Amino acid sequence: MSTRAWKALPALMLLAACATTGPKTPGDPYEGFNRKMWKLDEGLDKAVMKPVAKGYIAVMPHPVRHGLSNMLDNVTEPFSFINGMLQGKPKRALNSLGRFVINTTVGLGGFMDVAGRNGYPKTPEDLGQTFAVWGAKKSTYLVLPLYGPTTIRDGIGTIASQWVDPYRIVIRKELSFWPAAGLTAFEFVDARANLIDSGADSLLDSSADSYAVARSAYLQHRQAQIEDRDDGGNGGSDDAALNAALDDLGPDNGAAPAATVPTPDQPQPAPTPETGASPK
């Protein structure tokens, strides 16, 4: 899972923070190792990534940051097209291709999401999702140093994408080591800045178990992406997949049923006269 996908997690983090977890969590057999890596990542984040991201937010106007973030999203569209085809989803694949053509030309290299405003929503696909469609539907949760939450399936997909993603191929062939490393670092700073903007930090800081909250949010959001729970597989976006995941978490997941409150238009019973006469 790329750093781009973390934009949509805060709402799920809020839900996960309200959930209770048992002593053992299915799908997380390496929880002891993962918690150590999570603590390490938290320390590195507080010491390096968060201050850098805050500095970036302070010096860069929001419209410019948003445009640069759009450009980073835009270069992932060709790989989304490839994965959409590999998954047997031609409509989603062509949507990604259309977004890339429109935003690269009319949208000034992707700085403006012209396609999104004209009926071409984001439908991100990656190798992890492709592996899931091919049969690897469930995978062991894993937290990696410097990278954060993932699964074994998604981690393999991320590594393999370095050799099959057109964007990564161009970077590797056209840029020397330091410019390529700088671009990768900027991608992480941009993703971290987006998390700050979203309010995810406050949700994690206020939770009793930030590891469990992040794990639950990641896995739920990832499952929503894999299942294309947006508009039936013919469009949608990362945010739509998130909303679909939220919709599936009904009252059985801790939500209290709505109370029925009479409205002013509802007829009220007539008072019983003290004389005992029947009302007219």
Image (cartoon, grey):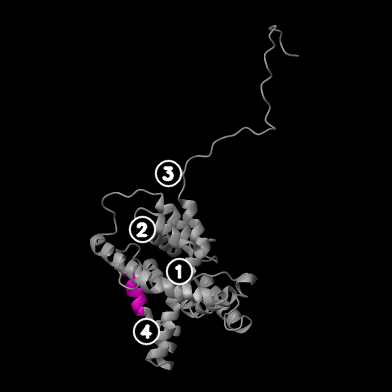
Q: CA distance from mark 2 to mark 3?
A: 23 Å
Give the residue type that dot 4 points to.
Answer: Trp
Give the residue type that dot 2 points to.
Answer: Ser
Instruction: Tell me the residue that label 2 is attached to.
Output: 210
Instruction: Tell me the residue that label 3 is attached to.
Output: 252
Residue 187, given in percent of the width and then of the height, sits at: 45, 78
The structure residue drawn at horizontal position 41% and vertical position 92%, both measured from the top left corner, is 173
Q: Residue furthest top?
A: 275
Q: In the rendered image of this protein, does residue 263 appear above or below residue 173?
A: above
Q: Quadrant of residue 145?
A: bottom left
Q: Are marks 2 and 3 in contact (CB under 8 Å)?
A: no
Q: Can residue 84 be seen at all in this image of the molecule?
A: no
Give the residue type that dot 1 points to.
Answer: Ala
Mark 1 falls on what kind of element? Answer: helix
Q: Can residue 109 be seen at all in this image of the molecule?
A: yes
Q: CA distance from mark 1 to mark 3?
A: 27 Å
Image quadrant occupied by the C terminus: top right
Give the residue type that dot 3 points to.
Answer: Asp
* Label located before the other in sequence (1 or 3): 1
* Label located before the other in sequence (2 or 3): 2
Q: CA distance from mark 4 to mark 1?
A: 20 Å
Q: CA distance from mark 4 to mark 3?
A: 43 Å
Q: Left or right of 251: which side holds 115? A: right
Please tell me whether mark 4 or mark 1 is closer to you in this view: 1
Residue 163, label in figure: 4
* Range of magenta residues: 151-160
Residue 14, given in percent of the width and then of the height, sits at: 45, 54
Residue 5, label in figure: 1
Answer few, some or many: residues within 10 Å of disc 1's Cα (few below 14, many 20 plus, some between 14 and 19): some
Residue 79, given in percent of the width and then of the height, sits at: 46, 78
